[in-house]
Image (tube, grey):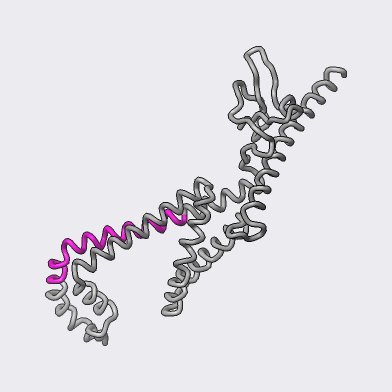
Amino acid sequence: MTYAPAEEELRKRLRAETALGEAWRCLRCGDFTLGAPHGSGPAEDAPIVLRGQALRDATILRLIAVFRWLKALLVFAAAFGIWRFRAHKDAINLAFKEDLPLFQPIAHKLGWNIEESGVVHTMRTVLSARNTTLTWIVLGLVIFGALLTTEGVGLWLLKRWGEYFAVVATSLFVPIEVYELVEKVTWLRIVILMINIAAVLYILLSKRLFGLRGGHAAHEAERHESSLLEVEAAALGRSLTSHHRAAATSD
């Protein structure tokens, strides 16, 4: 991660001339690397080195991205299952009607009214659904999975559009998750809801989206300050190294 700042004093402290050519100090590790710098410009516009606060932010965003990809994988799996079911619905419906009476005697002995069973009711509802309805469900799941995948890509690449996308997309589904929780409380639904709310709040506040905490201007100022600090830290390291070497030589 080498960078040539436009400021002459910093530029001199980050550059060294060797027998093999020029070398520039890495902003990440502090070592000199042979060859031309990867970038140049004002020190405040230097690339952000992923360590400290920047590394923590990147780690959290990428964990959220992995969570989104896992959710997308489940959604795509559900879409594939429904599509396969749609293709063989008639055979499954026939088998269900023929085999269900066989369980009646066993269910009667267990005191279970199979006709009022929620599972049986759900199966009948699904089997009675029209192929067109199932096709629309599959299409909806595919679109939802694609949105989750896109959100994950934006967050993993640490793009600002990905942060906005994540906040908007996640917020749209929070009311649905609250409704599902009101219908039936489960630990899984509670955990998923809390994760999504925490993710939205974290991205909103830490990335200063929608004008919060100074908005985009404050976010860019913070990034520029971080860049400048990285350049100055690298230059300071170069200066200290030279000082120690000079002291050792004099000794």
Q: Quadrant of residue 148?
A: bottom left
Q: Residue at x 74, y 35 (%)?
A: 232
Give the answer, above or below, for where 215 lies relative to 32: below
- Give percent across and percent down for residue 12: 73, 24
Answer left or right for 45 relative to 238. left
Residue numbers of the magenta segment:
67-95
Answer left or right for 133 relative to 239. left
Query: Along the line of sight, which residue is nearer the eye, 192 or 218?
Result: 218
Q: Residue at x 42, y 78 (%)?
A: 184
Q: Residue at x 77, y 32 (%)?
A: 236
Answer left or right for 132 relative to 189. left
Q: Residue at x 25, y 85 (%)?
A: 116
Query: Along the line of sight, which residue is nearer the eye, 70 or 131?
Result: 131
Give the answer, above or below, for where 94 lies relative to 84: below
Q: Would residue 73 be counted in the magenta stretch?
A: yes
- Give percent across and percent down for residue 26: 65, 30
* The residue positioned farthest toward the right in the image shown: 251
Q: Quadrant of residue 17?
A: top right
Give the answer, above or below, for where 186 lies relative to 142: below
Q: Would residue 82 be counted in the magenta stretch?
A: yes
